[in-house]
Image: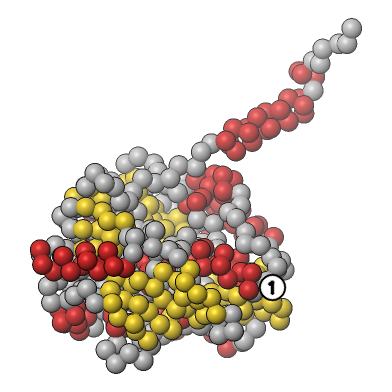
Amino acid sequence: MKKLIDLSKKPWFLGSLVIIFMMIVLWNIPVEKRKYGLTQTGLVTDYTGLLPKHVEKVVVADNRIDLQKIVKEANRNGQKISVAGLQHSQGGHTYYEDGVVLDMRSFNRILEINETEKTIRVEAGATWEDVQEAIQPYGLALQVIQSQSIFTIGGSLSVNAHGRDIRFGSMAETVKEMTLLTSTGEIKEISRDDSEEWMKYVFGGYGLFGVILDVTLTLTDNDRYVIHTEKLKTSEYPSYFNQLLANDDTAMHYARVSVAPSSFLEEMYMINYDYTGEKDDKTLLKDEQAVRLTKLALDLGRRGGALENLFWETQKMYISSINGKEITRNNAMRSESTFMEYTKPDRIEVLQEFFVPIHAYEAYMQDLKSLLSANDQKDDFKVHNITIRYAAKDNFTKLNYATEDMLGLVVLIQHGLKDDEITGATAKIQYWTDLTLAYGGTYYLPYYRYQTKKQFKDAYPSWEIFKDEKLQRDPNQVFQNLFYEYYVK
């Protein structure tokens, strides 16, 4: 008869079993998704859930003729229409109280791919991932998208989004042609040299000038890049970035700033995507990887203090580990997003983005230290992440945030949902906005409305022209949303 194993004499074996058990448990913990969006119950909200409103109805977009009828009917009946995609904007940009919401997500067909001219015509409800799947076999890639590929094309253009590419300018500049459903129910084919300048107002127009039905996008080659990573002091970044911009070897770039107590706003790491001279039409599009492990690390960092230090060190180790690895352009443009889900009761995570001129960055970051707590473990207002992206000067759109070459600080913030906690977070973000404006900067409009109306007008002095054009092009004020009502109307 075989002897039973005495586990007390084999602690390594018992420890291994515990580790395996814990890994199985962690692997099977579901990644909760934030509950938000469009319902047929009449109550809708967007990604933060901070502005729930009752709407008359949600209409799933099916075809352009039906959409045309809805708009014409709204003119006759005095209805208000909002346009929605994935709804990751956070300030009521995609709905209006007692209005009609057009859900564009099923309006998502790929209409034409021109391999020779390197263009794609696609309906506005398609996601960037849909486009990537269609063009990858041709060895083609997008010129500009956000870091993640989950958003709809119409939504991204409506908020005038930008991404990691540092060579192709703004996302709006990649659109060759557009089909627009106007407020009067007219369907217009619009090119970049359109004398009525519709694109200037539709891109970054938050659905207030009409419904984007489809766009023709200019593409580029699916290049293969080698990743280069580097750690820097914050004070070194402006000169580093200017040299990077002047050097044609790098196609894409972003950076992260430490918010860990031990190196708060002092340390940064760079991620560059350098040309190899090779094209790629073979490598498959990657799926999200290590979601649970990454989410666990982020959740630990969310606790602040020593755990935030640990999270930063873990990030640096990971960034160092990918130095020298190769990746295709398409795969560099589809970063993981599920791990960022945050569903803790009575708390919310929001985004803000502040833009500052490159030359002002170092002094701005020094002043930012006096505004934010280096160790926010016991604070209600917590900053979890700051990512730096480049936004080239935008001379095209009317509500443009990049009035010169800017660095954008994409900030992940957490705060409570009690009235005093929201008030405190609002005050902190307004101070941050004032600091940004003092340095000749701006802030991004798709997020929750912490900023005052005066700050909006100071950051976007062309708002009056925007409003005048809105009144001329939409005389019955058919297209409406909560953002417009609060800041512009």
Name the residue: 32% across, 90% down: 194
Q: In what quadrant of the picture does the C terminus appear? A: bottom left
Name the residue: 27% across, 56% down: 59
Secondary structure at numbered mark 1: loop
Quadrant housing residue 123: bottom left
Residue that label 1 marks: 280
Q: Position of residue 292 (x, y in %)?
A: 56, 44
Name the residue: 28% across, 74% down: 181
Q: Nearer the viewer, residue 293 or 197?
A: 197
Name the residue: 36% across, 45% down: 35
Q: Nearer the viewer, residue 317 or 373?
A: 317
Left or right: where 254 falls relative to 396: right
Is residue 379 positioned above or below 473 on the image? Answer: above
Q: Position of residue 342 (x, y in %)?
A: 42, 47
Q: Nearer the viewer, residue 235 or 163?
A: 163
Is residue 349 positioned above or below 30 on the image? Answer: below
Left or right: where 128 falls relative to 44: right
